[in-house]
Image: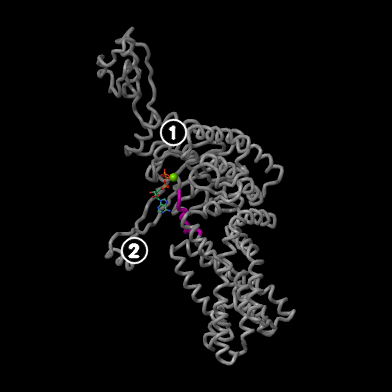
């Protein structure tokens, strides 16, 4: 399996190198949103004496920088690709080979992240300086961040595949994933750090998977939660990864029987 | 034939399609109740193929050939019936099965467009876990047979249709499958490329003993490669037997061609001998019932005497036979 991954990686890096510019532009585009939110929160905080809850202007900056990084590291766009592959019959050659189609997508995903991580880091350092971000990160936070972001990436990837697999039944996956993205917008920590959501919304957010993909690893990286809280949140991540792992297996097994292999 | 490589019993596939009606009223209605229609793409077919056979799978557009091949290669789950290929149930898609089978479609691509085929071959080597030595020799052999030398180093998107098809063939056979399903492998290729692909399939079958099930609308492919054909129409089996017998079973007539010395064929009345199909300068083509062909030929030779320069008795062209099969509603015939 390691050899297979290595071969796929080499081929994908080669293929992706032709789209490097597009990848980087897309990455830059994905940073715009958090920066807009950051600017908005900075404005609000300044109008209220520089502090909202436990966050001052410099905390907001650190939070949205961490969020951008996590967002990039956990990005998964399967639902969109996969629906296209199913509709156009592109899935067929992959299904005919003795390797689960998910692996091609893992590799594509990894390569995209490898291509964009360095330019993204440069942009984020620039933002950090501009907004004078303050990180409360301890070495222990950094240590926990690594497994936490990996869990988040796995969760994003698996939940993305569960959504993608719906393409076996419907051609409206797009609508479902738009709904999913809207929910993530509120509950993942994009519109505001989870800690600043009003009480009931916060409870809902912690019961849903979205926050475990973005907000949780971002706060761990920023040092915005205590170590015990971080561990607790990571336990939540593990639970969601397990749930989506089994959900994926089930949905895939049933769904692939529906596949109509369109296209001559 | 207990050692059949492909064993298909009463295989069926029904597609359920949603009918989209036009007009606003119909669209609104479709929110409440969708009109579904069943398409019986494959309506219960049974056949077996032995090891090393090259079988032609024929039928008009929409007969269900591709659907059958997709089921046999594991892409589609059948609605009913059974199949076993190399002892596996195809649609379980066990890795052991996938590693010994290939489905090649003339109008689909499975290579990555952005990289040269040689790099795709490397990926396939790892996916199929092909040992280095075997990989090298297979690639060399395919390169030689298909004349791929330069092609494999160009990005696939830069290849012509014919070149790409050759490379697709190599990619599809890189794991030396023992069963190959070929769906219109020569579609869209020029005559000389068709001939090369044909030769390649024959050679591949000879060298490896692989079992091949092939569809094509080009009868030349079938004549060149298949001793046996299976004919389906509207999802049902019409004929399964030697290609040579197809004409005899399906077209109960022969074609007699008589060439006359004096070039006066147009003035000679030959209607008494059979149905005149064509009449050119010095040459008359007649269609006669199969049973009476020898007798009519004898009479022609006798009656025309020395005016006759040449005479031949043949089965009708294969295209014509096939066309007859599809236009007439015949019941199942197997040889
Ligand atoms: N995914 C699908 N959904 C609905 N109907 C389908 C689907 N695939 C095939 N069909 C229908 O099933 C029938 C058989 O199609 P199939 O592609 O097997 O024919 P074929 O023999 O390969 O024809 P051709 O020679 O044109 O390639 C056709 O009527 C086709 O419209
Ligand atoms: Mg077809």
Residue at mark 2: chain: B
Closer to the camera in the image, B136 or B246:
B136
Asked if residue A209 can be seen in this view, the reply is no
In the shown orientation, is residue B189 left or right of residue A249?
left
Quadrant holding ligand 2? top left
In the image, residue A4 lies at what x, y percent?
Answer: 66, 54
Looking at the image, is B167 positioned above or below residue B25? above
Ligand 1 has an atom within 8 Å of the beta carbon of the residue at disc 1: no
**Local SS, label 1:** helix
Mark 2 highlights which residue? B34
Q: Is residue A53 above or below residue A125?
A: below
User: Tag 2: Cα neighbours inside 10 Å, few (<14), some, or many (≥20)?
Assistant: some
Q: Position of residue B294 (x, y in %)?
A: 35, 18
The residue to which callout 1 is attached is B219
Horizontal arrangement in the rendering, residue A152 relative to residue B276 (left or right) = right
The outermost residue toward the front is A130
Q: Residue at x 55, y 82 (%)?
A: A192
Span shown in magenta: A256-264
Q: Chain of mark 1?
A: B
Q: Is residue A184 left or right of residue A235?
A: left
Where residue B236 sits: x, y (%)?
39, 44
Question: Real-space Cα distance between discs 1 and 2?
Answer: 42 Å
- Residue A176 visible, this orientation: yes
At x 57%, y 88%, the residue is A45
């Amino acid at each position: 399996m390691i050899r297979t991954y290595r071969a796929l990686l080499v081929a994908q890096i080669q293929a992706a190198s032709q789209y490097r510019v597009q990848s980087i532009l897309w990455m830059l585009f994905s940073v715009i949103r958090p920066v807009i939110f950051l600017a908005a929160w900075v404005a609000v905080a300044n109008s209220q004496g520089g502090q909202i809850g436990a966050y001052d202007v410099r905390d907001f900056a650190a939070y949205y920088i961490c969020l951008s990084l996590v967002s990039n590291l956990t990005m998964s766009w399967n639902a969109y690709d996969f629906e296209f592959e199913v509709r156009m019959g592109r899935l067929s050659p992959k299904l005919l080979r003795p390797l689960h189609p998910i692996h091609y997508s893992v590799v594509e995903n990894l390569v995209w992240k490898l291509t964009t991580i360095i330019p993204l880091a440069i942009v984020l350092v620039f933002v950090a300086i501009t907004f004078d971000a303050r990180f409360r990160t301890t070495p222990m936070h950094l240590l926990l961040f690594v497994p936490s972001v990996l869990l988040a990436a796995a969760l994003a990837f698996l939940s993305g595949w569960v959504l993608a697999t719906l393409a076996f039944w419907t051609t409206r996956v797009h609508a479902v994933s738009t709904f999913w993205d809207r929910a993530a917008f509120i509950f993942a920590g994009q519109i505001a750090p989870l800690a600043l959501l009003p009480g009931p919304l916060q409870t809902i957010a912690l019961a849903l998977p979205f926050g475990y993909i973005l907000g949780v690893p971002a706060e761990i990286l920023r040092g915005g939660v205590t170590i015990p809280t971080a561990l607790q949140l990571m336990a939540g991540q593990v639970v969601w990864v397990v749930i989506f792992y089994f959900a994926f297996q089930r949905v895939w097994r049933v769904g692939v029987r529906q596949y109509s292999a369109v296209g001559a | 034939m207990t050692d059949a490589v492909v064993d298909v019993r009463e295989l069926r596939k029904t597609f359920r399609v949603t009918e989209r009606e036009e007009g606003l009223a119909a669209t609104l209605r479709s929110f409440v109740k969708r009109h579904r229609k069943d398409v019986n793409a494959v309506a219960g077919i049974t056949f077996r193929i032995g090891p090393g056979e090259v079988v032609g799978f024929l039928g008009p557009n929409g007969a269900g050939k591709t659907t059958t091949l997709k089921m046999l290669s594991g892409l589609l789950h059948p609605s009913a019936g059974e199949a076993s290929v190399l002892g596996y149930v195809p649609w379980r898609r066990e890795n052991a099965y996938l590693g010994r089978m290939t489905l090649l479609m003339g109008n689909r691509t499975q290579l990555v467009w952005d990289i040269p085929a040689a790099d795709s071959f490397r990926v396939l080597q790892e996916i199929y876990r092909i040992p280095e030595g075997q990989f090298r020799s297979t690639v060399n052999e395919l390169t030689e047979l298909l004349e791929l030398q330069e092609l494999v180093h160009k990005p696939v998107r830069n290849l012509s249709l014919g070149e790409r098809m050759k490379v697709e063939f190599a990619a599809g056979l890189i794991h030396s499958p023992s069963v190959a399903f070929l769906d219109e492998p020569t579609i869209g290729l020029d005559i000389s490329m068709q001939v090369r692909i044909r030769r390649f399939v024959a050679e591949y079958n000879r060298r490896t003993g692989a079992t091949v099930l092939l569809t094509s609308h080009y009868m030349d492919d079938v004549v060149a490669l298949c001793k046996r054909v299976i004919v389906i129409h509207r999802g049902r089996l019409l004929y399964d037997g030697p290609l040579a017998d197809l004409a005899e079973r399906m077209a109960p007539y022969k074609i007699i061609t008589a060439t006359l010395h004096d070039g006066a064929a147009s003035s000679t009345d030959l209607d008494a001998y059979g149905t005149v199909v064509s009449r050119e300068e010095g040459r008359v083509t007649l269609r006669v019932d199969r049973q009476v062909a020898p007798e009519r030929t004898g009479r022609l030779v006798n009656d025309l005497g020395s005016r006759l320069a040449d005479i031949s008795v043949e089965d009708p062209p294969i295209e014509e036979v096939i066309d007859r099969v599809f236009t007439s509603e015949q019941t199942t015939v197997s040889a």
